[in-house]
Image (spheres, rainbow, N blue to C red):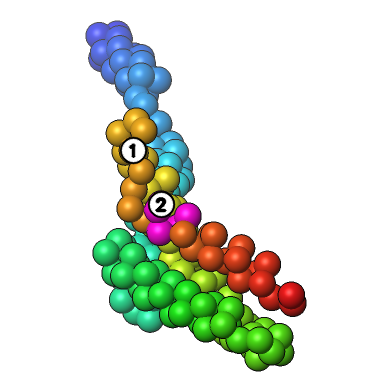
Amino acid sequence: MPEVERGTRKDEEYGEEEEEKKFPVWIIPLVAGPVLLIILIAALAGSRPTETNGQEEVFNEPQLKKDANDLLMKASKLYHDAMRLQNQKQRDELLDKAMPLCDEAIKKLYEIQDYYEEHNIQHKKGGIWDWEKILKEASVLAYDIQKAHGF
């Protein structure tokens, strides 16, 4: 019998050592769950597309430049027509129509500028983009319209 007791004691001691060495598995879901949730939220927040009326918005530089040029031509025509008039009231009416067109053109050109800044697109040193030339012309026209209004 002493041998049986010794064997049982060894089994009990071995079992206690084994239990002490086991990693508490129940900790894994407690730690991994919130970590995975945070990663999932960050991934979903970073990959959300910009939508307009259910469609994904696509940057179209040539279309923006064309629209800006068209608006500037209309605004410029109205400005020159207004400068030909002698009556200040009629002149101001035409200038009031020209200013929003010029502002809208500038807004479209700023969209291009924002896109270039966001994507770190730069031209060669000393160069100038064609949309920057259009923006300069639009700014000068807006200043001229503002200056002529009320004279």
Query: Is tag 1's residue or tag 2's residue first in the polypeptide sequence?
Result: 1
Q: Which residue is mark 1?
A: 127
Q: Residue at x 65, y 91 (%)?
A: 90
Give me the disc on residue 117: none
Q: Quadrant of residue 146?
A: bottom right
Quarter of the image for residue 94 reads bottom right
Instruction: Give the camera-side residue of 75 and 104.
Output: 75
How far is disc 1 from disc 2 in space, using C-alphas?
A: 10 Å
Q: Looking at the image, which residue sits at the far right?
A: 150
Q: Main secondary structure of the magenta part?
A: helix
Which residue is more in the foreground, 48 or 77? 77
Q: Helix, strand or loop at disc 1?
A: loop
> In which quadrant will I find the N terminus?
top left
Look at the image and tell me whether residue 119 can be seen: no
Q: Which residue occupies 30% across, 12% down?
A: 10
- Give the residue at x 69% y 75%: 149
Residue 18 lies in what quarter of the image? top left
Give the labeled residue for mark 2.
132
Magenta-colored span: 132-136
Q: Is residue 15 above or below residue 85?
A: above
133 falls in the magenta region: yes
**Residue 138, horizontal then vertical, whole percent:** 49, 63
Q: What percent of the width, then of the height, locates residue 39?
A: 39, 45
Secondary element at image label 2: helix
| Residue at 40% over, 53% down | 133
Q: Position of residue 28 (x, y in %)?
A: 38, 37
Q: Amino acid at mark 2?
A: Glu
Query: Pointers 1 and 2 in contact (CB under 8 A)?
Result: no
Q: In terms of depth relative to the viewer, which is nearer, 37 or 103? A: 103
Q: Residues within 10 Å of mark 1 (few under 14, many from 20)?
A: few
